Amino acid sequence: MISEAIDFRFLLLENYKKLKISENELAIIFMIDHLVSQGNPFITADLLSLKMSLDIKDIDALIADLLTRGFIEYATLNGKTVTSLNPLKEKLFREFQMSVSKEVENKKNKEEVLSNIYATFESELNRPLQAMEFSLIREWVELGYSDEMIINALKEALSQGKKSLRSVDKILLSWAKREDLESEGKTPIDDDWTKNLEETIRIAKTPWLDDDED
């Protein structure tokens, strides 16, 4: 059974669309859960119709569909028939487990990517990175720049004789603008935005920006 530490209702709201559960079916499920928690072990269409505005025929059809798709079941407990949402809860728990596993794997992959970028930058610049530089590189990855794109931007900056991460940042911005223009015909990254960013950086006067000037 799904762990009591995990909120079944939260998981259901997060995943019902993925499971192709309609809003009417969702209302039926929530009402069944409510009635069971109130001490009603066997839930019928008649009982649901007393609590819901849906027509009893529609409720009956929805219950039949949920049974067919294995989201609810009628089980025998202590010699009595009861309505159970355990099949649905098990499905939701599996979805949760897969989601957590995927998140952990993505985090692991991201850290591996970052580690590779950090090592490449330190090798190419022939010096250790500073705290602000680690932070900026992580920000690039969070923004969606690939490790290949970031490293290529570094090499482009070095080929121009520029060794600051500010130079790399400007190259990444210019490439992003170019891609937007090629694919969309426009870009949300305008010149005013870039100038404002540069002014903010100038005011901050962080040490890693002083390596060279553009």
Image (cartoon, rainbow, N blue to C red):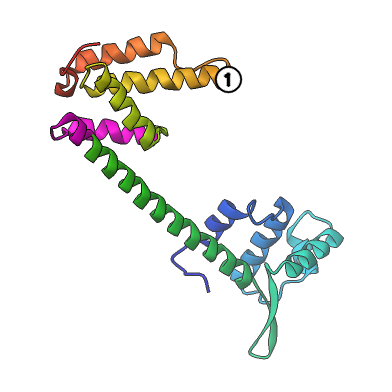
Residue 106: % across, % down: 41, 50
Q: Nearer the viewer, residue 136 or 99?
A: 136
**Residue 156 as seen in the image, left or right of residue 105:** left
Residue 79: % across, % down: 68, 91
Per the picture, the main secondary structure of the magenta-coloured stretch is: helix
Q: Is residue 155 above or below residue 120?
A: above
Q: Nearer the viewer, residue 154 or 166?
A: 154
Which residue is outermost to the front? 159
Question: Residue at 72% across / 72% down in the picture?
Answer: 43
Q: Nearer the viewer, residue 121 or 141?
A: 121
Few, some or many residues within 10 Å of mark 1 (<14, 14–19, 20+): few
Which stretch did the figure color magenta?
121-142
Q: Is 130 within the magenta? A: yes
Dividing the picture into quarters, in which one does residue 16 lie?
A: bottom right
The quarter of the picture where the C terminus appears is: top left
Question: Residue at 24% across / 37% down in the picture?
Answer: 120
Question: Residue at 71% across / 60% down in the picture?
Answer: 28
**Residue 149 as seen in the image, left or right of residue 118:** right
Question: Residue at 57% across / 15% down in the picture?
Answer: 185
Residue 136: % across, % down: 27, 30
Q: Which residue is under mark 1?
A: 184
Residue 84: % across, % down: 65, 74
Dividing the picture into quarters, in which one does residue 56 lie?
A: bottom right
At numbered mark 1, what does the secondary structure look like: helix, strand or loop? helix
Inspect the image, locate mark 1, and give the three-letter code of the amino acid beneath it.
Answer: Glu
Q: Is residue 145 above or below residue 82?
A: above
Which residue is outermost to the right? 57
